[in-house]
Amino acid sequence: MTAPILPRVRVRPATRGDLALTASWQCTFLPHGLFPRMGEQFVRCWHATYLDAPYGTALVAELRVPGRTPTPVGFLVGATDQVRHVDDVLGRHRARLGIAGAKALALRPRLAAHFLRTRAKTYLRRLLRGPSLAAPAGDMSDPARAGCAAGRPQTAVITAVAVIPGARGSGAGKELVRHFLAQAHARGAARAELAVIAGTGSADGFYTRLGWQPVEEHLSKDGSLTTTYRYDFGTGAAE
């Protein structure tokens, strides 16, 4: 009897052709935070800032079987240096994101009211000020609240990572995280961080098994209990 050919996971850089899919996955599987609630059109615009970015990373995981078309099953977006990535986004994409965000909020009055209560002053101040290495890194997309005070070690941040339900257990999530950590380490990051919302399935155990450690619990701007996980390259094994 011939053994079945099992799919192999391959991770590749995301392209503009992937943005509709990654935005859909973000809004479906990672709906927490402000940006996913602003809709897929805005999320596509946001994810685009990670493509060809000097400090941004956008990855897609595929399942590949010889003789068949690869099937995308997951994605990851993040920054190998969160401070400088936010700086780059504000410098190059500020107007485009601002316009897209205003359009999205105009279609969602309740979300717009929530934005005005929780984030408007911070966002407006930052948009008017423009890029600055002193600007808070964590507020761009509610990631791991990776602060950027002067002198802090270069910190990479996984902003979003998701695998479709049918491919969970295939190793796609592990490979996405592994590729990100390898890139971040090669680009000089001393550690990596990410945020996990309480009650999001088995994410806690998944990251712990990969060498991440919980370092802080806090409430997000939306009131969700969130755990910050950290991966120190001095103790972990990203390669």
Image: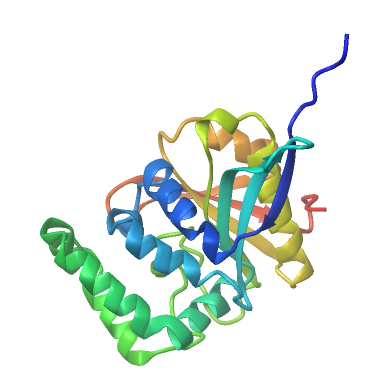
Quarter of the figure with residue 152 = bottom right
Instruction: Using the image, determine if residue 108 lies above or below residue 236.
Output: below
Residue shown at the point (30%, 73%) measured from the top left: 100
Quarter of the figure with residue 118 = bottom left
Determine if residue 107 is in view.
Answer: yes
Label total for image: 0
Residue shown at the point (56%, 71%) measured from the top left: 82
Quadrant in which the N terminus appears: top right
The residue positioned farthest toward the right in the image shown: 1
Viewer-closest of 78 and 83: 78
Determine if residue 123 is in view.
Answer: no
User: What x and y, as percent, mark residue 27?
Assistant: 37, 49
User: What x and y, as percent, mark residue 151?
Assistant: 61, 80
User: What x and y, as percent, mark residue 163?
Assistant: 55, 40
From the viewer's perspective, tell me whether residue 70 is left or right of residue 222. Answer: right
From the viewer's perspective, tell me whether residue 113 is left or right of residue 59. Answer: left
From the viewer's perspective, tell me whether residue 105 is left or right of residue 30. Answer: left
